[in-house]
Image: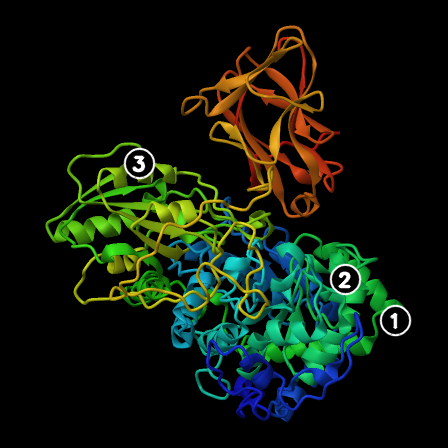
Amino acid sequence: MVKHLALKKALLISSAIFMAAACGNENTVKENVVSSIPEIESVAGVINPAIWPEVSTAALDPEVEARIDEILSKMTLEQKVGQVIQADSNSVTPEEVKQYRLGSVLSGGNSAPGDLPYTDAANWLAAADAYYEASLDPEGVEIPIPVIWGIDAVHGHANLTGAVVFPHNVGLGAANDPDLVRRIAAVTAVELNVSGHDWTFAPTLAVPQNDRWGRGYEGFSEDPEVVKSYGGAIVLGLQGEVGSDDFMSSDKVISTAKHFLGDGGTVNGVDQGNTDISETELRDIHLPGYLTAIADGTQSVMASFNSWQGQPMHGQKALLTDVLKGRMNFQGFVIGDWNGHRLIPGCTETDCPESLNAGLDMYMAPDSWKGLYESTMKHVQSGKIPMERLDDAIRRILRVKINSGIFEKPKPSARPLSGKTELLGSTEHRDLAREAVRKSLVLLKNNDQTLPLAANSRVHIIGAGADHIGKFAGGWTLSWQGGEYANDQFPNGETFLTAVQREVEAAGGSVTFDAVGDKVPDDIDVVIAVYGEDPYAEFMGDRENVDFTPNDLNPERLSDFRSANIPVVSVFLSGRPLWANPEINVSDAFIAAWLPGSEPAGVSDLIFRTDPAYDFTGRLSFSWPKNAMQVKLNKHHPEYDPLFEVGYGLTYADQSKLDQLPEDSGLPEGMVAAKGVFFEKGQTMEPWRFAVAEKHVNIPFNEGGIKIGGYDKAAQEDSFRIQSSSGAGLVSIMSGYTLDFAREAGGEVELSFDIKNLAGEGDVMIGMNSTRFAVPTTSEWQEIRLPLSCMDGLTYVRHAFAVDVESGTDIGVSNVKLAQKSDKALACPE
């Protein structure tokens, strides 16, 4: 087929740059990536393309290039501008896709047809057909260009009801198995085709260097060689092998290597922050995954939100054009990230010629697309964006569309795999996910060879997460942030509790369950405790340290079981290594389970003696900290001193005993544990405390006619009550220092809390910092959402939750935190 001709010849890889490297050799990055590259004295803020590796690929196919020439000659200027714009499905209609001749539609983490952020295959296909057919409407154009639809399928197609949810990358890195991730990518591509999607924004090839980063779990390892070994493998799974009949066939999708470049190296692990490192470190640590991805033919690369030495990547011409497209000979197109062009000085979401001129080929402009289209048109007409640059971007986009076969494909619902929902959660797909879970688990402690357990044991499971698929799956699951979705929203998944019950009861054992874990039953042989981080994504997961903060289960309860001579097995769920010495100390066996997804039977396979017999093979791909301030802990750094180093992991046969660990976290007094949680389970979270009239106060408080104390909602004093008999003034949850919430304000985040008016009903003035909303209240508990986008001064926040108290105020409040966008938010104040 013509679509194969552009890349029919095998890609040639220059010299020894792309030799397969053995993991664990600290010298392989420089030897294999930078060999035969001249050393040039670096200058701060200046990229020297000559010191970056070359990727030699086959010459462009003349037939395909001629086809592009023909299409370009027939396109109107309006079509050309439309092709470089991608809009979000929540913000664009099929009629607008036709009118503006847009090149692509995406569905962000919270975008799906209908009222929910996820939906079934039928709804996805109906929307895909509408966009596709609109793009091919010939009215007013000589040649219509088909639209391509992209989505973040980063651990399976997790916005599709019934799809398999695989372990997040942090766990897959511990498996150290490139063939495994290739097979996972291939299954993901199949399930994407079931719903009519053409394109996934994966693989993530970040090399996280600071565990505070909220996207750390999207990275495979702190070791660039692990990432390098996975980059090409995932591209092959998603797209097929270049030059083969499998390439971009009916069960494949376009891949995206992201985020170029240095997203895992920002200062303090701040999402979308500044990667303030040398050019050499940027190249040697953060580039390797792209070498194999480009060598294996990834059709798109996504520019990163981060800056390098203060220069936003969306405007970094030397890297996007001179290095990526020039030195590395990348022939696909560069897609932006969610309004990422706005980060360039002088740019806004709706106006940014600098990004296209720097080498971006398609703007990701989810809700800003129309204004961006109009301004881009003006810049092309004025010559600020040269026609040569616009035509190059269009050529690259058309090349990928031709390679993908989109010009020859029928509408999405008529393609071979469309609507074949029997493939979702098929035995083959679920077995692969279960295998991936087994291979990703790392056994950190197994004193007295507690594991494996006899399957006929009397097992007591504690921790609400054991009966919650969403907690096992983490962020980017059904929605951007993941979270509290009912188990029945995962029709082809199961809970850990269900998996254990099936295994144990079949062997003649018994299982009891207590979500809280505050009682010690008499007739049990072992306790399995499930706990860890709650789901999050992107900057919502940024932290100030790596201290594990208990949430739905108090691990101190585990000592009660050990005092009763009952062994404790901890299944620790997290998107990163966390300081958990107290929890490890009260566990006889401790498993780093990461975020395993919808097949937790892979965990039970390793806890119990099974037939066939399995063993732990996972090894840490991230270093495990000795204290909560070891946030940047990488094996290539000086003074490397982890609790468990990269490559650590026990098997059943290991008889080493882990002695009692120190329980001094190393946290400075008042250090914040969770930036986006202000009041939870009856207490404020550091550094937030109650304040009256700008002064911190202790609770209970009763002065000047204002009282603050505990109040019961679902449990004893899990909420707080504010009463005023005669006083008036400001009552707030206040920090001793300011925190920056500007990124959250730009990321569709809301202030969420539950409120009840104990005086009856009426409006209460509530907000953050100086902004106030008239919050309607009743005598019943209700959740309130206030959009941060409405609020002023969020670069310097001291008052996370502020109430203007009047005489007669009497309210109960609970669960004050930041949450992802919903349909419940109040309108902005006038």
- The residue wearing badge 3 is 517
Q: Residues within 10 Å of mark 1 (few under 14, many from 20)?
A: few
Q: How is the image coloured?
A: rainbow
Disc 3 secondary structure class: loop
Q: CA distance from mark 2 to mark 1?
A: 28 Å
Rendered view: 786 above or below 654: above
Residue 263 location (% of width, % of height): 63, 63
Residue 213's spot in the image, x, y percent?
58, 55
In the image, residue 701 lies at what x, y percent? 59, 15
Rendered image quadrant of residue 672 = top right
What residue is rendered at 24% in x and 58% in y? 449
- The residue that label 1 is drawn on is 383
Q: In the shown orientation, is residue 750 left or right of residue 503? A: right
Q: Nearer the viewer, mark 2 or mark 1?
A: 2
Instruction: Report which quarter residue 400 is drawn in.
Output: bottom right
Type of amino acid under label 1: Gly
Q: Earlier in the sequence, mark 2 or mark 1?
A: 2
Q: Residue furthest top?
A: 726
Q: Is residue 496 above or below residue 100?
A: above
**Labels 1 and 3: the sequence-earlier one:** 1
Q: Is residue 311 left or right of residue 107?
A: right
Question: Vertically, is 807 above or below 126?
Answer: above
Label 2 crowd (10 A; few <14 / some 14-19 / many >=20): few
Circle 2 SS class: loop
| Residue 147 in view (yes/no) | yes
- Residue beneath disc 2: 310
In this rendering, the label closer to the viewer, 1 or 3: 3
Hey, what amino acid is under mark 2?
Answer: Gly
Amino acid at dot 3: Gly
Q: Furthest-left residue in view?
A: 508
